[in-house]
Image (spheres, coloured by chain):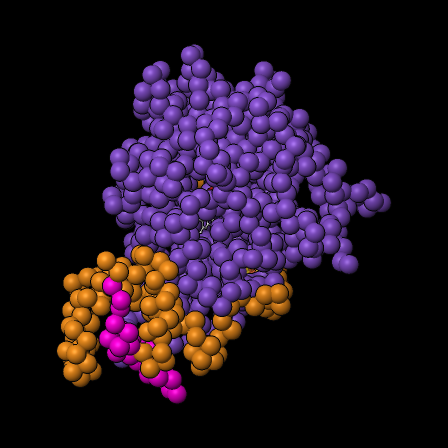
Chain colours: A orange, B purple
């Protein structure tokens, strides 16, 4: 049976998992629930985790009726009853959240690999070996 | 057009046919010695993925058939074909194109946990096979394709120590190898030159070794910070040997430009993978490489000798290839799996398994360690992830420590925010109100000391055939059984305590402990070990099966003990040595 995840419930949960910070709304307020659902639908391992977490949460109406502390309590209950699914779901949520350009801008992070330009590094300087070079060989002879 | 020059100094007195190949291709004489010439680094016309081998007769009987085109299979193919053997290699995966590696994709981090995961159980591509890890504390990780796991590896390339070959004599545990460090040394040197090693000789923790072909990769200001802490504690450290170009080296391979993303493939081709190093050479010399083809059994005649393999081609059609000898290079999981799949009336427990040791004594190297949080860390994410420095202060046995053998510390750099949030530094970032504060504290500030611990062989740690789980071709998948021993646990605990001291000495304000990682079965060792006694080993010191005289094993399966270093230079040195044995002693296998 294909279950259509409830985007509103997911969005409310995402806002508690990755709450607002600085100028940025929480992961739910950023509209990531649809992206989480889309990415999960491409991988049944991810989809399984998403569905397990959403099914284990209170119904959408009951969850929305809770205050922040109540929502956190409900999420914690799922975390302890379904640790593997919850952990994988967290990994997916974190990964998608930290793929967002707005989040990169806030963290001042370049995002993807800086190819083909690469990065600069100070050149190799052999003088750094001055202390260790004084040590006698100590590998075990056979 | 940019050309680069360098100097080669082949060891005198050794018969290195690969040196000759190297000479023929890229070395020119000059007044000052021997200078080598590289082709322009930025090329679009000679992608390895264009290299097709179409002009071979599939019905011929090849001299040697190799299963697996990874680190070891490529080395054997290049070596044997250079010596005019007729070689065919069957590989279940495909060529990769370095311009299409996902590290530059906006969603690279999601790919890192799905279609480009190091874990085949997460990647789940048709070319992969699953593993049943219900009874294992470690998940095997690997890549299946031309280049094998060197496509995804970090390319940190230390060598075993002489003591690793004499564990029984020295520490009265496990077994001695039938070969010594000195026996392997010429092939280590050769492999360092073909793969391209950056580093510097003079390390007091190791026997002297030849001049590295390239200077070390710069260790960066973060490397200097940790090195300084080791110096102040009076503990050993040394710049890591790495099969990563610090200068241009090899055909079409640029220098590392410090992008910081090696495990998702190297766009610069600075990181050596065998699709870039040995394979072009092997194919030039006439090796036939069949890709998208999964070997399902090694075939034998009525006397029990190998006659070739049966495999499923890219269309799923069952085919046979004949050969005078078979070389297994399918790694420490794939090789025992295939030997067990190749049972027959004559070998009811699997091919080459009269000892009963095929699949037994699996070793991974346990991996754990400590990460430190360094506020105001200079240059986050700059440079290769874990080719910086190592420490072998605690490598050799010291009975006062409460465990046998020892470990290497390998320094690692921090990664992107997604990876830090997922806990790559040892602990997943908490969700909820604390999330941002903790993530920001760890992000751009984390450096780690990973412990690669000597994992001694135990027969109950094993690869067997799973009765229910199958791959995309319907072949039984391997089942992995692996427990962390008391010795290993004590060793890891020691490493975590000492690693914490170093990180604190270097100025860490917070320490994250990683007691033992699960997804770190990147070193697959011991499952068809070598030895002199056919009752206690699967192959002899030359990699030749005790039971089947035209069957050879050249991958990490043949390790007797694991040592405490990343194993691939040793795997490739063993493969090259076996190839030389075939060339010099098994002329009967050549038509
Ligand atoms: C993420 C990661 C990081 C690593 N980092 C390091 C490091 O820093 N240093 C180091 O020394 N080592 C490292 N390693 C380990 C290193 O990659 C391996 O030791 C090395 O590649 C093993 O070589 P191999 O030839 O035995 O097997 P592989 O390179 O794994 O190649 C085996 C090949 O056999 C093929 N094959 C298997 N079964 C079949 C079949 N039935 N039919 C056809 N083909 C088959 C596979 O598709 C594969 O291509 C790392 C590995 C990983 C995954
Ligand atoms: S850090 Fe260097 S070796 Fe690693 S992927 Fe980037 S260029 Fe390649």
Residue B130 locus on image (x, y percent): 35, 44
Residue A13 drawn in magenta: yes
Residue A52 in view (yes/no): yes
**Residue B77 x %, y %:** 58, 33
Res. B513 visible in picture: no
Residue furthest to the front in view is: A1
Q: Quadrant of residue B464?
A: top left
Front-lying residue, B586 or A135: B586
Q: Quadrant of ligand 2?
A: bottom right
Q: Residue extending furthest right? A: B31
Vertical position of residue B100 compared to residue B51: above or below: below
* B411, B113: nearer the viewer: B113
In the rendered image, residue B373 lying in the magenta stretch gets the answer: no
Magenta residues (range): A3-27
B193 relative to B449, above or below: above
Q: Which residue shows up at 17% across the image and 79% down it?
A: A61
Residue B232: percent from left, percent from top: 45, 63
Residue B481 position by quadrant: top left
Number of marks drawn: 0
| Foreground pick, B375 / B295 | B295
Write the residue at 48% across / 38% down: B315
């Amino acid at each position: 049976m294909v279950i259509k995840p409830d985007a509103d419930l997911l969005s409310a949960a995402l806002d508690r998992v990755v709450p607002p910070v600085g100028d940025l709304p929480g992961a739910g307020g950023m509209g990531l629930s649809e992206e989480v659902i889309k990415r999960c639908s491409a991988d049944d391992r991810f989809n399984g985790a998403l569905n397990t977490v959403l099914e284990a949460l209170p119904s959408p109406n009951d969850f929305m009726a809770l205050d922040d502390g109540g929502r956190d309590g409900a999420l914690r209950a799922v975390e302890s009853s379904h640790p593997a699914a919850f952990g994988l779901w967290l990994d997916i949520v974190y990964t998608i959240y930290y793929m967002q350009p707005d989040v990169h801008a806030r963290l001042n992070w370049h995002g993807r690999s800086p190819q083909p330009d690469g990065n600069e590094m100070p050149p190799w300087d052999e003088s750094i070996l001055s202390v260790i070079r004084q040590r006698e060989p100590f590998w075990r002879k056979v | 057009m940019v050309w680069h020059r360098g100097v080669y100094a082949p060891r005198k007195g050794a018969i290195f046919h690969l040196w000759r190949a190297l000479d023929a291709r890229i070395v020119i004489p000059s007044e000052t010695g021997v200078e080598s010439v590289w082709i322009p680094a930025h090329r679009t016309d000679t992608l390895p993925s264009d290299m097709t081998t179409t002009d071979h007769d599939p019905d011929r009987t090849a001299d040697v058939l190799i299963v697996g085109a990874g680190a070891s299979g490529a080395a054997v193919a290049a070596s044997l074909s250079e010596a005019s053997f007729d070689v065919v290699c069957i590989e279940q995966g495909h060529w990769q194109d370095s311009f299409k590696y996902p590290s530059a994709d906006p969603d690279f981090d999601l790919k890192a946990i799905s279609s480009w995961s190091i874990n085949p159980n997460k990647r789940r591509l048709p070319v992969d096979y699953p593993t049943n890890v219900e009874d294992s504390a470690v998940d095997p990780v690997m890549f299946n394709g031309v280049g094998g796991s060197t496509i995804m590896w970090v390319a940190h390339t230390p060598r075993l120590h002489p003591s690793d070959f004499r564990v029984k004599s020295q520490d009265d545990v496990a077994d001695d190898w039938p070969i010594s460090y000195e026996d392997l040394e010429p092939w280590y040197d050769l492999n360092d030159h073909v793969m391209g090693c950056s580093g510097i000789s003079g390390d007091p923790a190791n026997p002297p070794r030849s001049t590295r072909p390239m200077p070390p990769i710069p260790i960066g200001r973060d490397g200097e910070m940790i090195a300084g802490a080791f110096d102040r504690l009076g503990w050993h450290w040394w710049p890591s040997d790495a099969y990563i170009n610090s200068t241009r080296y090899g055909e079409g391979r640029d220098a590392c430009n410090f992008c910081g993303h090696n495990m998702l493939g190297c766009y610069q081709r600075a990181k050596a993978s065998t699709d870039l190093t040995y394979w072009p050479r092997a194919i030039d010399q006439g090796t036939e490489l069949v890709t998208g083809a999964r070997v399902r059994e090694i075939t034998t005649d009525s006397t029990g000798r190998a006659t070739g393999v049966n495999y499923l081609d890219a269309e799923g059609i069952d085919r046979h290839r004949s050969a005078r000898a078979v070389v297994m290079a399918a790694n420490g999981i794939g090789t025992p799996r295939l030997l067990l799949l190749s049972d027959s009336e004559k070998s009811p427990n699997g091919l080459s398994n009269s000892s009963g040791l095929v699949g037994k004594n699996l070793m991974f190297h346990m991996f754990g360690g400590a990460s430190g949080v360094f506020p105001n860390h200079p240059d986050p994410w700059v440079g290769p992830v874990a080719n910086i420095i190592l420490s072998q202060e605690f490598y050799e046995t010291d009975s006062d420590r409460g465990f046998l053998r020892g470990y290497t510390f390998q320094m690692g750099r921090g990664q992107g925010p997604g990876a830090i949030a997922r806990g790559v530094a040892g602990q997943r970032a908490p969700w909820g109100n604390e999330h941002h504060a903790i993530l920001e504290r760890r992000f751009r500030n984390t450096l780690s000391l990973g412990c690669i611990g000597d994992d001694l062989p135990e027969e109950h740690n094993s690869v067997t055939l799973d009765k229910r789980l199958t791959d995309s071709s319907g072949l039984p998948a391997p089942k992995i059984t692996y427990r962390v021993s008391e010795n290993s646990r004590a060793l890891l605990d020691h490493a975590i305590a000492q690693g914490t001291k170093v990180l604190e000495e270097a100025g860490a304000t917070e320490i994250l402990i990683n007691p033992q990682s699960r997804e770190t079965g990147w070193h697959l060792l011991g499952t068809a070990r070598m030895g002199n006694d056919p009752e206690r080993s699967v192959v002899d010191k030359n990699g030749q099966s005790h039971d089947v005289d035209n069957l050879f094993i050249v991958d990490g399966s043949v390790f007797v003990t694991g040592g405490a270093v990343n194993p691939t230079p040793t795997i490739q040195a063993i493969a090259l040595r076996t190839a030389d044995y075939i060339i010099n002693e098994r002329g009967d296998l050549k038509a």
